[in-house]
Structure formats: structure tokens, C-alpha cells
Amino acid sequence: MGRPSYFDSEIMRAKYQSSVVISVYKDSNALSCILYALSIQSADDFEVIVSEDGCSEHMAQAIAQQTYIPAHRLLHLSQEDKGFRKNRALNNAIRASRSSHIIFIDGDCVPSIEFVKAHRSLSSGNSVTAGRRLELGPKMSRVLREQPRLIKNLSSGLGYLSLLPKILLDRGKNVESGLNSSLLHYLRRAKPSPLLGCNFSCPKIHLEKINGFNEEYEYPGLGEDTDLQWRLERSNVNITDAKFLANLFHLFHERTYGLSEKNLEIFKRSQKEGTIVAKHGIVKH
């Protein structure tokens, strides 16, 4: 499949070194924390795309009033709220992105200060970079929501270690994923993590090659990461690990879903048929 025609349009030519795509649904308070964290990144020259799986007036108002990211670097995309259509929203963001390198995060995950820089430094021409996330407990999540500047402490080695007892007492999970350590990253470099939809990056051309996310998945889980990884690997794209470098802090909320049988059916069918290029993706067939 050739490149989609939109790629060659003048408007969509690369303007930034990276595009950070934030997948959101209604939680404008968490988005505010994320935008603050992105405003103090050690890297620059990136745009921010808020990809909303819905069309909330409250979200639009919050984005219009935010002061962290300059308006010319911030793009808000929305679509009609008709159930879980995250993959459709993500494909919208790929089409609209103005860079050749895209970083994906979820709207309940706050990036460390070195996040964008780490994804860029680990990016290569033939790989997708997969990071992990630390899951904060309810108390620490509330504090971070109320005091976004806490991300500075969480991003530094000594600052994180000083907060670690509180994180553990608050039932934080995967706490090792909050450590920023080049040494730890080096020691596990041969063991790449599976792709997580909330923390990965990829050259845009690889996403175009497989026609982006499969929009047949209309339930959470599997469709925006496991399926994507399977198709990328079968198009000869490698997985590069970003653990201990591209750190992400997940804000606590009750999980309201499990693994969908419908998603499993779609994934098994794709595997059986060897479907690498999504029929319902960036370009519809």
C-alpha cells in the first residue's frame, strides 16, 4: 500500500520534531496536569495533539483556557461520543500530526520531565519505542492533580526516592517504573517490554505502512496496543525498550472494564488471516 494522499499535502508536511498525542475522555483535570508536565519538558520542538474520544463542551473550554502550551503548538481533535472509539480518535491524530515521530500517552498518565527527550533519543528508523507506567494510589494521585508541580520531584532520582515510602503506603503499583536510571535501562536493554498504548512512540511512516489503528476494536484493551504490536512486528518493525527512561505516572481511578471477548475474536481473526494492514484504519478500504 502506498502512502496516503494526505501525507503529501502542504498542510501536513513535517513542522515539528515530534507530536505528542494525548488520548482523552472527559477528565480535563488530569489533562491539565499532563499539559503542565509537557510545558516543562527537557526537550522542545514538539506539538501536542489532544485526541478526544467524544465532544465535551467542558473539555473544549478547559483546553481553550489552558496556559501551559502555546496555541500554535496545541491541536484539539474531537468526534461524536458514540461509545468507545479510541482507535478512530488516534487515527485522526495520526492524520493531523505535523511531525514524522509520534509519541502516544493516555489522558490519565502524567509524563516525567525527560519523557519526550527519552523517546526521541531511543527512536530509530526501524523500531517502535515501548515504555511503562507507575500506577499511583488514590492519595498520591489526588495530590498530583492538585499540585502538578510535584511531577518535578517525581522526575528526579532523589526526589522520587524521597516520595517512594508515601507511594508504597498508598498502594502504588509497578514502583520500579518510576526510577530514572540509565544503568537500570542498560542492564535490561535486551528485554524489551510489550507495547503499552499509554506509553509508546513510533516513526509515523511505520504507522502509515500498517494503516494505523484498527477501528474494528470498539472496547477497551488489546486493540490499541497488542494488535498494533503484532502488526508492526510482522511488518519487520522492532521493539525498543524505554523502561527507566521514559517514565509515566498513572493517576488512580477505578477500573470499570475487563478484556472483551469481541476484541479477542477480532485479534484471533487477524492472526489467522495474517492481516497486517488494517482495513478500517487511517485510510478506509
Image (cartoon, helix red, strand yellow):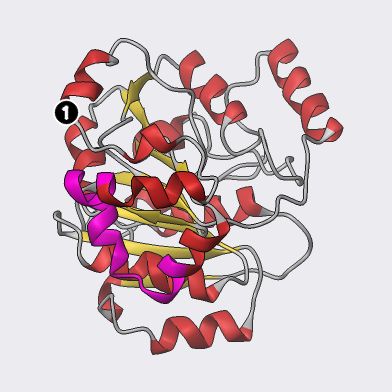
Residue sitting at x 43%, y 76%: 146
Magenta-drawn stretch contains 54: no
Residue 11 seen by the camera = no
Residue sitting at x 66%, y 69%: 54
Left or right placement of residue 131 versus residue 30 in this view: left
Q: Quadrant of residue 176?
A: top left
Left or right placement of residue 72 versus residue 280 in this view: left
Residue sitting at x 42%, y 60%: 96
Report the residue marked by disc 1.
182
The stretch in magenta equals 143-161
Vertical position of residue 16 compared to residue 263: above or below: below
Disc 1 residue type (three-letter): Ser
> Residue 122: percent from the left, percent from the top?
22, 31
Left or right placement of residue 21 versus residue 256 in this view: left
Comparing 107 with 33, the one in front is 33
User: In the displayed image of the protein, which residue is found farthest to the right?
Assistant: 261
Comparing 5 with 47, the one in front is 47
> Residue 117: percent from the left, percent from the top?
18, 45
Vertical position of residue 101 compared to residue 2: above or below: below
Residue 82 seen by the camera = yes
Check disc 1 and report its element: helix, strand or loop: helix
> Residue 272: percent from the left, percent from the top?
74, 11
Vertical position of residue 152 compared to residue 260: above or below: below
Residue sitting at x 29%, y 40%: 246
